[in-house]
Structure formats: structure tokens, C-alpha cells
Image: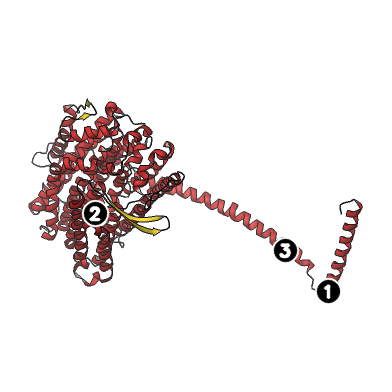
Amino acid sequence: MYADYAYLIVALPVLAFLLCLFIGWRLPVGGGFITVLATFAGLILSLGIFSEIYPGEIVHQSMPWFANFNVGILIDPLALVMLLMITFVVTLIHTYANGYMKGDPGAARYFAEAALFTASMLGLVYADNLLQLFIFWELVGLCSYLLIGFWYRKPSAAAAAKKAFLTTRVGDVLFLAGIILLYNNLASLNLALKPGEYLLQFPVIYANLASIPGDQLTLIALGLLGGAVGKSGQFPLHVWLPDAMEGPTTVSAMIHAATMVTAGVYLVARMFPLFYAAPHGLTAVAAVGAFTALFAATMGLTAFDIKRVLAFSTVSQLGFMMAGLGVGAAVGAFAVGVSIFHLIGHSFFKALLFLCAGSVIHAVNTNDMREMGGVGKYMKWTMYTMLIGSLSLAGFPLFTGFFSKDEIIVIAYEYGTMINFLPYIFLVLAAVLTAIYTFRMWFSVFTGKERSNYGKHESPWVMLGPLVLLAVFAFGFGYVAQDDFYNYLDSNFEHYDVDFVQLAGIGGHEIEGGHGAEAAEGEHAAAAEGEQAAGEGEEAEGEPWYIQILPIIVAIGGILTAAFFYWDKVKKFDPSQVTGDKDPLRQTLLKGYYQHEIFTGWFAETVVYGTALICNMIDIKLVDGWLNWLSAWVMGFAQHVRKVQTGIVQNYVTALVLGVVVLVVVITLAREVGLV
């Protein structure tokens, strides 16, 4: 019953967008309650669909759109967990925004854009084909531009919005190129499609991967990865994400937790069979993800803007998710469950952290942690809920982040034993730094002496309520849901009869024990439950005990390190004594590895501007020059020809007679030589 109304999950936020846009200015807080009701209704529908199809069914609906193409809805385990997460988290964010945006003259515009943003992400998730997904993908990019630049009169916000839009367009071009290449390869197969099937539909793609040449699969995978790198803020297209904080804090929470940045990870997860079949496809994913995780974590150590610290942590955690998918080269499709589990858990504690940051900013009217300190005395609820989010982000035992992020580290170790240890090393280092910068932030904000005068008040309950609910999930979701989540996600590609053993041969993967991808998935699913697993006749060996406890040591060690530097009660070191203001490493981190200077000072002003000058010269001298010469020659020739047009009848008669004489002479000569 609920599945018949699945289209309303997207349609209701679209309706909320229209209502807020046209009549929101007449309603309290811009009609924010309409957006809350729309997303909450989507949550109820998603829960209803979950109750109907869990654990072994999927929903697939389609209808004609234009010739040879349908628009469809595909709700399988992967799409369903994303729908549940997005509708739940975004409902809480919109509820919080009703308090946060109160009094803002642009509230109606905000809730209209937020509703469209939500609808776009939901449409992206349950699209049943790549073209439909790409359309919603572009809508997500448009909405992010509008929301990041919400305070468009502020120059930094307008610049950040433009930066996000243009940077992600680079990835989108690569994504579109990958789609076109995939379509051409599928079209060349002359497939006998059944009624209702069409090219670029996910089941059709999965069923025909083995028929596409390996080199083509690699090119397609790199194109799709380019799109994911742009949307999910991975190196080198990550530069837009830290600046996305220029919008309202609730926008940051949506972008960083539940909507835009998760789209890239979702794309790689959705197309995992293709990446698995593509030689070196998952290797590229693992390399990009692991490097980004460590790279962004280092920048979080020196940031002073509380939202920027969280932004760098988002980039880093997205790197963990990408790396988790990339190490699927060793563990098969089990990696999809591990990575998406971290994505879901991350959405809870990152939304919590951003909303807590918004609560603090709402009270103290500054983003700079150097102007905070001692806030916990006046904001107990915010302090303790943010502590839960921080412990989860740091991977502290029994919190959600411990069960999600650290499982990625463990399977990265197994990837290392079979292929390469670099992703594992990078992720361990990133985990240490994550714990340090997270609690550097928490201690700097809530403990110590007050460093400025600010409004000493807790946020209203319309803002605190969502914090408490998110804190519950940030604490308990991992422990409660891990085993069932892995089992459910492991069945995702079984619905499409994806043969991972065959794809492993195409991609050149060597699965542990020689059993193939399916056996590896079974082994790791059981390992996640702490049990011994058998892989088609041979016992699977677990990781060494020191590998299993290393994430715990890393989390606790990082928190203690931050405490010794930033918690006044146990402080033993002064950060300024470790690195001075002019220390080269500190300056490098503060400047973000001089990325801005490289992108604007060198790439934009030198490479792009230089290329533009060359193109302009070619255009003026070669293209326009040739056309101008040709037109001048034609005009000159015409000037000479027009002289015979005198307007005197005698001249025309003379020319006619001469013409006749010439013709007679020519014909006579031709007869003489036998040509006529």
C-alpha cells in the first residue's frame, strides 16, 4: 500500500517549495512548518515502505517519459536506508530551522529552497536510472548554490556559492562524460530489452557489465568517480566544501550531513558492480578517499572557525567512506554495507555537531572559538549533546562512530595484506587527528575561562529538541543496528543477480582465500558479528587482536592529547610552545596548503587566463582574420566586376556581340580538332 505512494516522498517537498515560495511570506517563520510536515510525511511513507518490503523485497515502478525512455522509482535496501536517513535527519534540521531562522526577513525563501533541496536529494536516491539520477544531481547542485549564497548581499557568501557551483560543475562534466560513454557501450551491444527495460536503467547496467570491454569500464568508472569527487568534496575538488559554511548553519547541517555531499558516496555505492568490474576502478576510489581523509584532517587541527573545523571533518569523513568503498577490491560488496553504515552514522552525529555549533553561535554571535570558552556553564544541553556528537566522531567505544568508522579501518587493513597498506596507514593517522581536532574544538568552546562578553542563554526547545533526538542516534544507532544493517545491505545486489565472481575476473581482483567476492562478503559479514566464518569450505581468519583494538587506542589517545593541550583542568602543554605563529608547518595548515593561492593565483590567473589570451589571439588572428580576409577579397573582386555594369545599352550590345563571336570561334576550333 505505502509503495503505491512512493512518488509522494519527492512530490510533497516540491509542493512545500511552491507553497513557501508563493505564500510563505504571509505565514509564521516563512511557512517553515510546511517544509517540516512535508519531510515528516516522507519519513512516515519511507517507514511504511520499509515495513512492507523488509527484508527481502524491492519496489520498482516506471512510466513512459519520452521515446525509448522511462522515468522510474527504485527502492532497494541501499535506496531505502538512504531515504530513511534523509527524511529523518532533514525533518529534525527543518524543525531546528524554525527557531534558528525566526526573525530573518528571507525565511520564506530559505524554507522554499530547503524544501526543493530535500526533494532533489530524495529524487536522486530512488531514481532507477543514471539519466534521472543526473537530473536530480544537477538540481542538488543548483539548490546548494542558492542556499550557500542565501545571504547574497554578503560578499563572502556570494563568492562561496559561486565557488561551490563552479567547482562541482567540473565533476559534473566528468560524470556526464561517464554516462555518455556507458550509454554508447550499452547501445553497441544491441541488447534485446524486455518491455519496461531501457538503457541506463540500473538493473540493465548490472546485467551487462561483463559484455563491456575492461578499458571502457575503467574510463566510465573514472568519469563517474569525477562526479563523486566533486559532489562529495574529495581532493582535488574539495575546495568548495569548507566555504559552504557561509550559508545559515542549518544549510551547513543539510549539506554536510544528509544531502549534497552524501550524493557522491551514494553514486559510487550504487554503481559498485561497475567499479568492481573496472580494472583499477576501486583502486582509484581507495586512493582518493584515503588521501582526502588524512589531508582534510590535518587542516582541521589549526582552524579556529567552529563551522570550518566541522567542514574539514566532513571532508575527512567522506574520505573514510570513499576509502571504505575502494577497499571493496579485497572484500567485495561487503564494503558497500560498511561504507553506507558510516554514511548513515555520520549523518546523525554530523548534523548534531553542526546544529550544536549553530546553537552556540546563536548565543555568542561569533564563529571564532578563540572568542568562546566557558560556554558550557550557560548551555548545559548544548554542551552535553555536542559531547555525544564529538565522542561519536572521534570513534570512542560504544558510540556510533566507533562501530562505523573503525570497521572501515579494519577492512582497510585486510586490503593492505592483499594489495596495499597505504590506505590503512592514512586512515589510522586520520583517525588520530580526528579525535584531536574534535576535542580541541569541544574543550575550546565549553571549558576554560570566558574570553568575551556574549549572551548567556541556552537555545529554545524548538532547537534543543532535535539535538536530543540526534544525540540518541549518535550514541546508540551503531550498537543497535550494525549487524542487521550489514545483513540487509549485503542482500542489495542479490536482487539483480550480480555475479561478483565473474566481475572479479574482469576487474583482476584476488579475493582472500580464492573464494571470490561472494565468499568474502559472507566472511566479513560474520566477522562483523565477531563470529568465525567459513568461506566455501575454508575457515576465515580474523584480523590480529592488535589491529582490532588499535581504533580504540587511537580514539582515546587522540582525546587525551587534546585534553593535555586544551582542557584547563589537566592542561600540561601550551599549543603556542609547540608551534609558533610563524612556524612553516602551522602557516601551511592555516593557509590550507596554499590551495587558494594555487587555484586562484596560479591556476586561475596564470593557466586559465593565459589559455584565454591564447584562445582570444587565435580567435582574432586566425578565425576572425581568415574570415575578414575572405570577406575583403570578395568585396574587392566585386568592386572590379561591378565596373562592367555601366547602365549603357550600347556597351551591353557590344559585349553580347563579342560573346557571340567568341562562342563561334571556340565552336569552330573545337570542330577542327575533332572535339565536337
Residue type, label 1: Val
Q: Position of residue 460 (x, y in %)?
A: 11, 60
- On residue 638, which mark appears? 3
- Residue beneath label 2, please? 254
**Most foreground residue, 524 or 454:** 524
Q: Is residue 596 visible?
A: no
Judge left or right: residue 632 versus residue 356. Answer: right
Residue 96 lies, with reference to residue 269, above or below; the image says below
Q: Can you say which quadrant of the picture contains the C terminus?
A: bottom right
Image quarter for residue 553? top left
Q: Position of residue 461 (x, y in %)?
A: 10, 59
Image quarter for residue 47? bottom left
Dot 1 lies on which element? Answer: helix
Dot 3 lies on which element? Answer: helix
Residue 401 lies, with reference to residue 623, above or below; the image says above
| Cα distance between the residues tagged 3 and 1 | 21 Å
Q: Position of residue 496 (x, y in %)?
A: 31, 43
Q: Can you say which quadrant of the picture contains the N terminus?
A: bottom left
Q: Nearer the viewer, mark 2 or mark 3?
A: 2
Residue at 13% over, 49% down? 471
Give the mark, 2 or 3, whose residue is nearer the N terminus: 2
Q: Are marks 2 and 3 in contact (CB under 8 Å)?
A: no
- On residue 279, which mark appears? none
Judge left or right: residue 240 versus residue 481. Answer: right
- On residue 649, which mark appears? 1
**Most foreground residue, 391 or 578:** 391
Residue type, label 2: Met
**Most foreground residue, 87 or 113:** 87
Residue at 55% over, 51% down? 617
Residue type, label 3: Ala
